[in-house]
Amino acid sequence: MTKRQKQKRRRRSDLILRLIDVVLILLFGFIAISEVSQRSKIELAESSTVPAAAPDREEVVYIGVLPDQRYLVEGETRLIEDDASLLGYIRSKRSELNGRNLRMRVRVRANHNAPVQPAFRVVNFCQQMKIPVGLDVVKKTGV
């Protein structure tokens, strides 16, 4: 193999390595800017406030409010049809967590086009039972 052929082969391998570097940089760039989140049936309303972080030794129970005034619980896998059943669910969940020596906190996730009354009924239930409760919203950008 001549010297010229060796140089040509080296240039090709250098070019391939540079292309691989560029592809990897692009790949990691896309991974870094992509939003990784769990798919949810609830589309949150927007707010300009930032939610507080949850402390240790407590469990957050998420309650989703649908536009037809029904509720989603247990990771949006169980549907609750009315307020009385929801109140029973909250009570049973609180006693279950008390048995495991965990404090309970409720986060209400109302769909953006759901009426506000069902969400505030959940808030009122939790306040009457002295359970910390918050309303999840999406932070609005550009405000």
Image: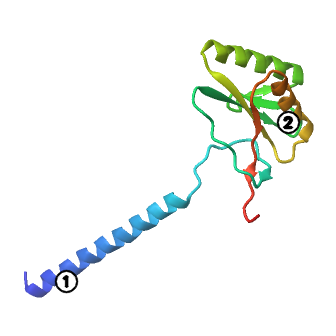
Which residue is rendered at x = 63% and y = 12% of the image?
Answer: 99
Q: Whole-percent x and y of residue 13?
A: 24, 74
In this view of the protein, which residue sits in the foreground, 80 or 109? 109
Q: Dividing the image into 4 quarters, which one contains the C terminus?
A: bottom right
Query: Which quarter of the image is occupied by the N terminus?
Result: bottom left
Residue 8, labelled with which disc? Answer: 1
Query: What residue is at 72 percent from the left and 61 percent from the top?
Result: 141
Q: Position of residue 86 (x, y in %)?
A: 82, 23
- Determine which quarter of the picture holds residue 136: top right
Q: In the rendered structure, which amino acid carries the disc numbered 1? A: Lys
Where is residue 68 shown, x and y percent of the image?
A: 89, 37
* In-image side of 72 versus 70 (left or right): left
Q: Quadrant of residue 84?
A: top right
Q: Is residue 28 visible?
A: yes
First along the sequence among labels 2 and 1: 1
Cα separation, mark 2 vs mark 1, equals: 70 Å
x and y percent of residue 91 in the render? 77, 17
Note whether 137 is above or below 14 in the view shown.
above
Instruction: Kindly state the secondary structure of the residue where label 1 is placed.
Output: helix
Pair 2/1: label in front = 2
Classify 45 as above or below 122. Answer: below
In the image: residue 2, left or right of residue 103: left
Q: Which residue is mark 2?
A: 119
Q: How many marks are shown on the rendered structure?
A: 2
Look at the numbered disc 2 and give the secondary structure of its residue: helix
Name the amino acid, label 2. Answer: Ala
Q: Identify the disc placed on residue 103.
A: none
Q: Say whether residue 12 is left or right of residue 39.
A: left
